[in-house]
Amino acid sequence: MNRDIGDLCVLVTGAGRGLGAAIARAFAREGARVAINYRRSGAQAEALASELGPRAAAFQADVTDAAQVAGMVAEIGARLGPPDVVVHNALADFSFDGDARPHLDRLDWAGIEAQTRTAVGGALALIQAVRPHFETQGFGRVVTIGTNLVQNPVVPYHDYTAAKGALLALTRTAAKELGPLGVTVNMVSGGLLRTTDASAATPEAVFDIVAGQTPLGRVTTPAEMADAVLFFASPWARAVTGQNLIVDGGLVFG
């Protein structure tokens, strides 16, 4: 089944600000109905929904709580229609400042667990909540957000990178299981983005270093990464599933 983006209802988690907001704007630009999920960024999410117009609305839920996710999906269905596309962008509290992140001698399991609960647990709760609709209509799109640090772990973001590595594994196993239902599951992995709330703590010198090492000579923006997410929801990606597309200006190959 092929469906244009403008015919779809899209749920973007963690969409009140940063990359999630850029993804929500990209889908709204293409005419989709957009459900803006947030956990604590209520004011930002409501402002974004107002900016995007009547085909967008904000919905509060903690993606680590399966009951909240199920309730949110039901509410979205009542207001905008059931989600046809889920973009799992929600991020546990994290600051991209390598100097402030714990190295292995100070890292504890709680840090890894917190990141994994949001990245993997959230993806699982979302897939379980939307699967009945996907199965009924024989169509669905899931896009997870990863990181190029899995391929190029140059910064000691052990907890964050481990969680995203596990999310990549779930992305691929879910693609295998959901494929017969007409559902594709893919990941878009970025590098350092200029600039989100999470990367605001990154020293300017690091942005300069990354730009200097990148073939395109600049740091990727949230809007550029959002456009790659659109691809996986579009008819042009109908035969693509279980893939991880790295969007970082060519900094990492593979």
Image (spheres, rainbow, N blue to C red):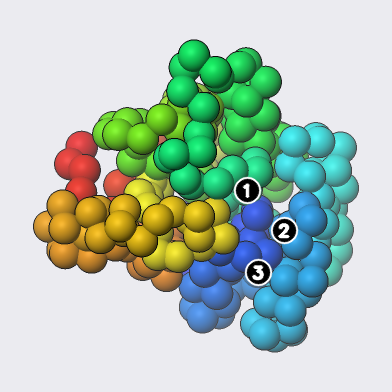
Measured in 3D between alpha carbons, the distance from the residue under mark 1 to the one under mark 3, in whole angstroms, is 15 Å
Residue type at mark 2 is: Asn
Measured in 3D between alpha carbons, the distance from the residue under mark 2 to the one under mark 3, in whole angstroms, is 9 Å
Residue 1 pos. (x, y %) = 47, 55
Q: In this view, does 150 lie above or below 5?
A: above
Residue 4 pos. (x, y %) = 48, 69
Q: Does residue 96 appear to the left or right of 138 in the view shown?
A: left
Asked if one can make out residue 14 in the rendered structure from this viewpoint, the answer is yes
Quarter of the picture containing the C terminus is top left
Q: Does residue 17 appear to the left or right of 105 in the view shown?
A: right
The residue sitting at 49% across, 73% down in the picture is 26
Residue type at mark 1 is: Ala
Residue under label 3, please give it: 34
The residue sitting at 45% across, 32% down in the picture is 157
Q: Which numbered disc, 1 or 2, marks the residue that appears first in the sequence?
A: 2
Q: Residues within 10 Å of mark 2 (few under 14, many from 20)?
A: many
Q: In which quarter of the image is residue 165?
A: top left
Q: Are marks 1 and 2 in contact (CB under 8 Å)?
A: yes
The residue sitting at 72% across, 71% down in the picture is 44
Q: Are marks 2 and 3 in contact (CB under 8 Å)?
A: no
Q: Quadrant of residue 161?
A: top left
Q: Report helix, strand or loop for mark 2.
A: strand
Q: Residues within 10 Å of mark 1 (few under 14, many from 20)?
A: many
Residue 110 pos. (x, y %) = 67, 20
Residue closer to the observer: 179 or 148: 148
Residue under label 1, please give it: 90
Q: Quadrant of residue 193?
A: bottom left
Q: Residue 37 bears which disc, if any?
A: 2
Front label number (1 vs 3): 1
Q: Residue furthest left?
A: 215
